[in-house]
Image (tube, helix red, strand yellow):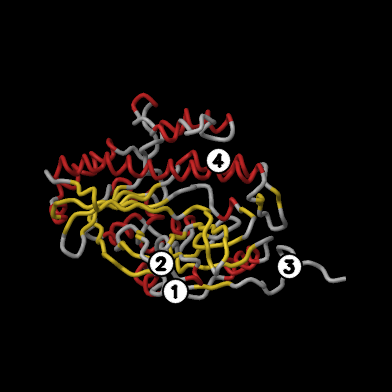
Amino acid sequence: MKRTPRIGDRLRPKVPINAWLTEPMPRDVKLAVDRLARAPDIQRLAIMPDVHLAERVCIGVVAATTHVIYPQAVGGDIGCGMSALAFDAEADALLNENLAADVLDSLLLSVPPMRHPSRHEAPPLPTRLTESEDGTPALSHPMLLKAMDREGRVEFGTLGRGNHFLELQADEEGRLWMMVHSGSRYMGQAITGLHLQRAVRVQGGLKYFDADSADGQSYLHDLAWARAYAEANRRQIATAAAATVVHHFGARADWTSYISCDHNHVRAENHFGRPLWVHRKGAAPAADGEAGIIPGSMGTCSFLAQGRGCEESLASSSHGAGRRLPREEARRRITSSDLADEMKEVRFDRRLAHSLREEAPSAYKSIEAVMRAQKALTRIVRRLRPMLVYKGV
């Protein structure tokens, strides 16, 4: 009797897998992609040039289904993404070491890395996050509502650690820009953790919902909330940091230039003439003409981009450079002195060099190589060179 393939079977995946790579996929990444390709209802996969290993589903992967939702193909930091804002100021002013030091100190106060001292000292959550239009609870479970009232409030307007950052950058004309990378903070993790407890487990450790089931609808409802929280969080960070920049530079923030996008989500889209649920985990949406932000690494260029709407990529692009070294390996191989050398003229808090060495440019792939690999997916609109980097630890 013919047996239906299951996750973990060493069979050639029968779904289309398209990839835009800077180098051959490592074996562990390829195995993870092949396992995902054999999961129930996976219709297509697109692999971005920044792909690297992560738990269950690799970062830099786009997966399409017809009716199944995989929370692990979104990740815990739901709605994590990028924002960019221009100023009417010359970026070279940051070559003044005293000014750069003052700006870094002010950013630490205006944008805490992890949490505000108390909910009373945190900016208020937007009403759309606390009150639904139809009078139903903003989130699907009392535990999540409690988390919103506690952690959701004290973390609102905070940056986070790891690869999250706030940078001041210079474009090709020397104009000052600000870029923010942050997400849904504690709330995204809480939402993912709660819903994974209810999900259907399949071989290989993946879990899923049917999109039309009650549990699936609850997850999608909370995911939409987390995306809205993450977007509001980036906007709040940008607002607070812009006030600091305006104060120190005597410049005006150009809010007409503001761009924001996220790269951890699932949403309903149409591709190849049919409706699909498109999961992006560390991949940016890149529909034709869609504005995008593709950061490099600490100390390398970032890009404002525009999607080309490539169907084979499920209208997606990379979300950044992608890790070359796992964090533990980077901590073993990269010293504080290495980080300082790699950063060259880029200002950062050198007191944190030991803790930030896993974020060194050499821990990441070449953003230039990534952009070359995805020329068919996205076009470069503006190149931004880092001048000052603020990261939390």
- Give the vertical position of 296 relative to 79 (above or below): below
Please rate how many residues cluster around mark 4, counting C-alpha atoms within 10 Å: few if below 14, some from 14 to 19, many from 20: many
Residue 37 visible in this rendered orientation of the protein: yes
Q: CA distance from mark 3 to mark 2?
A: 31 Å
CB under 8 Å between callouts 3 and 4? no
Pick out the residue farthest to the top.
Answer: 120
Q: Which residue is mark 3?
A: 9
Residue 333 quadrant: bottom left
Q: Which residue is mark 4?
A: 191
Q: Position of residue 208 (x, y in %)?
A: 65, 51
SS of the residue under disc 4: helix
The disc, 2 or 4, on the residue closer to the chain's N-terminal end is 4
The disc, 1 or 4, on the residue closer to the chain's N-terminal end is 1
Tag 2: amino acid: Lys
Tag 1: amino acid: Thr
Residue at screen point 13% across, 46% down: 251
Tag 3: amino acid: Asp
**Closer to us: mark 2 or mark 1?**
1
Q: Which residue is mark 2?
A: 365
